[in-house]
Structure formats: structure tokens, C-alpha cells
Amino acid sequence: MRDLTDDVALMRPVIDALRASGSDPDRVLARVGLPPGGLPTGRFPHSAQNLFWKAAAEECGEEHVGLYLAGHLPAFHGLLLEYLFLSSATFGEGLRHALRYVRLLSDTLNARLEVDGSRAVLLLGHNAGTNRHFPEMLAGAVIRLFHALTEGDFKPSEVQLMHEQGAPAERYRQGGGGPVRLGAERYALEFDAAVLEKPSRHAAPELLRMHESLARRQLAEVERLDLVRKVRELIGELLVDGGATLEQVAARLDMPARRLRERLAMAGVRFNDLVTDYRCRLAKELLLKTDERIEVIVERTGFSEPSTFYRAFKRWVGETPVEFRKRGKA
């Protein structure tokens, strides 16, 4: 199963909220192994969320840190999805545009809109194992954003949270989010569908096309990196069984080998280069961090003969495996 990731853009507003609350975000970042001064670009493992929120709760001295920081969030954060909202003709159109590109923020949101007559529901996910601070903060951030986009017309009739244990009801009421139901089947916001027709004062068709074009390019880049990551993972799994061919990986991905080769070419990489890179990195790691015999490393890196491994390693690194291990451990 592949690692789920979040874009750092999802956490930048939280860093701003920490700073606005009087807490030191640099100390929180240090606890999760990130440098001070803000988040780097790119994506990070979703599994780091638990550690981040634990550090944030201790730094703020707040048991209900997601709700606490949601109260310090600005309405707008300068995200591309917000510009899709603003330049759309109506709030509903902007919401539908943004939902197409929600993966730019996280692999875990799985957000979608359901409309049934006068009732609308925005689903924010079904992952019951999520740390409760993250969805509570996210729900608060979404409510504040939607309230601003609709000039105060957006008012959720119910906030649905999957966790059974949460904050006291009064803490949820203070956030202005409407009634909260704990132990729900999903994370969701229920609201009056009429607000979807609210016109946007900033509607601009030309800007909408520009923002959507940028969103498509960014989503294509996320999908490119996702494909390369999946292929690397499968190469690692297949090498354990003695080999990793393009055909084997393509079969695991349920696509023709030719199509996989074309998609990798579009991503700017070649399959054989990914295999070589994986073998080289694995060989280096095993030589430096373990005392495995060379014969075992030969097998684990997918080579059939030690002599072939020796020649390949000398070509990659410029020295033999034995020389590399001696120098590295010295």
C-alpha cells in the first residue's frame, strides 16, 4: 500500500495560526524533524500528522488544539483552490471546480459534494483513524472560508465528525460552526443548498481559465510523482523475488507495458534507470548499515551472479563493494 501524502500548503495556514496564537511554530517543526522558518515545498507523509498535532498541542498547552488553532486562522490563505472559488460565477460553481483539484492538498481528503433537494453535504473524508485535531481544524478552516466567500450566507446546519470523543459542546459552539455530531459515519458539513447559487463578486472567466490551467498542470505533476513512486515501490517488492521487469510492474499496475513505458517517458524517466537507481541505493544502504555478506546483497539487489553485481557496482560508484564498505565504515 502506497504512502499517503499531504502538500505542505495544507499545513502553512496552521503554521500561521500557531504564530498568531502566540506559540512558536519553529519548536513544533523541530519536533517533527523539519527546519525552522517555515515548511519546505513539496509533499510530506500523512503519517507525520499525528506527531505534528501532538507537538502543536503541547506547544499551545491546548487539549483541543485543532479547534483552538481554527480560531486563529485567517479566512483566506492564498491557495490556488481559493482563487478557483473567487473567479467562478457562483459559490457552487467554485466549489465544484475546487473539488476537482482537492488532491493538490492531500491524498486523504476524498472530498465531494452531494445535493439532495434543499440539502447539501460536503464530504471531507471517511478515514476513522485520522487524528481528531486535523479534521476539527479543517472543518473550522472550511467554514471560515465559505463564510467569507458567501459574505456570511454560508451557515452549516450540522458538522459531522467521526471520532467518538471530542471537545465539550460549548467549545464547538464557540467556533460558530453550528451543531456538531460526534461518532458520525463520515467527516462532513451539512448546509442549505440555496447558498450554492450565491453569485461571486469576484467572478472573472479569464482568470478562472488561467487558474484552472495552473491547477491541471499542478495535478499532472502530483500524478507524475505518484506514478514514479508506485513504480519504485513495485521494483523493490519484485526484486525480492529475483527480478523486476517492465512487464511485471505494468501487470501489477493493471496496464499494458507499452502504456507504462509511455507514461514514464512523459514523466521524464526510464524504467531501467529506476531499477538501476533502486539497486544502487539499496546496495549502498546494505553495505554501510548492515553486516550482510556480499552474496546476500547480490541476491537482495536482484543480481544472479556476484561477478555481475561487482561490475555494476564499480560502474555506479567507481570502487568495488568491499572497498566502498571499508571506506564507509572507517
Image (cartoon, rainbow, N blue to C red):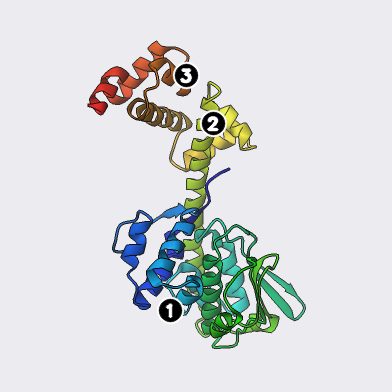
Q: Position of residue 293 (x, y in %)?
A: 39, 17
Name the residue tied to disc 2.
237
The type of residue carrying mark 3 is Glu
Which residue in the rendered view is the most extreme toward the bottom? 152
Residue 102 seen in this snapshot: yes
Secondary element at tag 2: helix
- Determine the residue positioned at 57% across, 60% down: 130
Q: Position of residue 110 (x, y in %)?
A: 61, 60
Question: Are the residues tagged 1 and 2 within 8 Å (C-beta)?
Answer: no
N-term mark: 1 or 3: 1
The type of residue carrying mark 1 is His
Secondary element at tag 3: helix
How many marks on residues?
A: 3
Residue 320 seen in this snapshot: no
- Determine the residue positioned at 45% across, 73% down: 62
Give the distance between the C-alpha atoms of the residues marked 2 and 3, in whole angstroms: 13 Å
N-term mark: 2 or 3: 2
Tell me the crowding category of disc 2: few under 14, some 14 to 19, or many 20 or more residues within 10 angstroms, Cα based.
some
Q: Nearer the viewer, residue 68 or 188?
A: 68
Q: Quadrant of residue 52?
A: bottom left
Q: Quadrant of residue 54?
A: bottom left
Name the residue tied to disc 3.
299
Q: Nearer the viewer, residue 175 or 267?
A: 175
Q: Position of residue 277 (x, y in %)?
A: 40, 31
Name the residue tied to disc 1.
72
